[in-house]
Image (cartoon, rainbow, N blue to C red):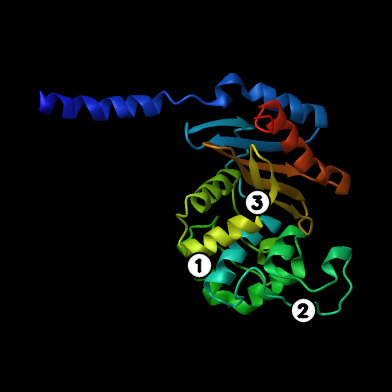
Amino acid sequence: MTKLLSLIVPFLLVSCNIQEKSILDQYSPKDIKNIFDHENVKACFIIYDLKANKSLIHNQERIDSLFLPASTFKIINSLIALETEVIKNEKEIIKWDGQKRFIDSWNQDHNLASAIKNSVVWFYQELARRIGKERMSYWLKKAEYGNQNIGGKIDFFWLNGDIRITTNQQIDFLKRLYLNQLPFSQKNQETVKDILIVEQTKNYTIRDKTGWAMRSKNQIGWYVGYLENKNKVYFFALNMDIKNSKQAKKRTAITNKILETLKLTHL
């Protein structure tokens, strides 16, 4: 009898896991496609339910195409900077160099928390220079980030160099960050997760990062992150073609509309 139970129990556990219900089961890719069609943009999108191990995908053909990470690279840049101790913590200030840039919020001193919130390019360029090519390459390979190619200038390679990442890889990277499975200390992973928080209610928390490869011939935009409720987490990644700043604003607007449609922001 004991031997029989030892065979049955694992089977039941596996079966329960397979049958895990997901809110995504109530929708189809068409529900997401309709949103993109209404906005008239060329894009792909993934939302992934970790607990149920289920995804909803728009534009399957594009999700494994490689693109510049642009400012989504600031997530791993923050992790590497903390791990290599080129910056002590999320509160350490780096002084503004006094050079006026086209976004007003950049023209001041910043720390890691404010720099990622305002997507301050000069701040992360300084971190990259402090890290250097050798250490940057080492950590990108160790973290298995994108194609791991840092060809180009050390302070520009994620903006117009050779590094590339797919939408699927963005989801995988965020999942490993959430689970503290990246090759960085747990403390540093928790710090970066904290500075990525953009919305927190009694029902859910959203962490995210936008990106816009505006220096490339074919401009693309990103919006990646994840939403947590009490016992579930949903990872999302949007990649789309961008022609102007008006279109760039659609990255978050479209994703928010999807989360609303899936009732994930009405928990």
Q: Quadrant of residue 48?
A: top right
- Residue 150, percent from left and from top: 59, 67
Eye-nearest disc, 2 or 1 = 2
Mark number displayed over residue 67:
3
Say what secondary structure mark 1 lies in. Answer: helix
Question: Would residue 102 be found to the left or right of residue 16 on screen?
Answer: right
Q: Nearer the viewer, residue 47 or 93?
A: 93
Mark number displayed over residue 139:
1
Q: Disc 2 versus disc 1: distance between alpha carbons? A: 26 Å
Mark nearer the N terminus (2 vs 3)? 3
- Residue 244, percent from left and from top: 87, 48
Q: Estimate how packed mark 2 is, as few (under 14), some (14 to 19) or many (20 or more) residues with alpha carbons within 10 Å.
A: few
Image quarter (top left, top right, bottom left or bottom right) of the N terminus? top left
Q: Disc 3 versus disc 1: distance between alpha carbons? A: 20 Å
Compared to residue 170, the image places residue 159 above or below, namely below
Q: Disc 2 versus disc 3: distance between alpha carbons? A: 31 Å
Q: Quadrant of residue 33?
A: top right
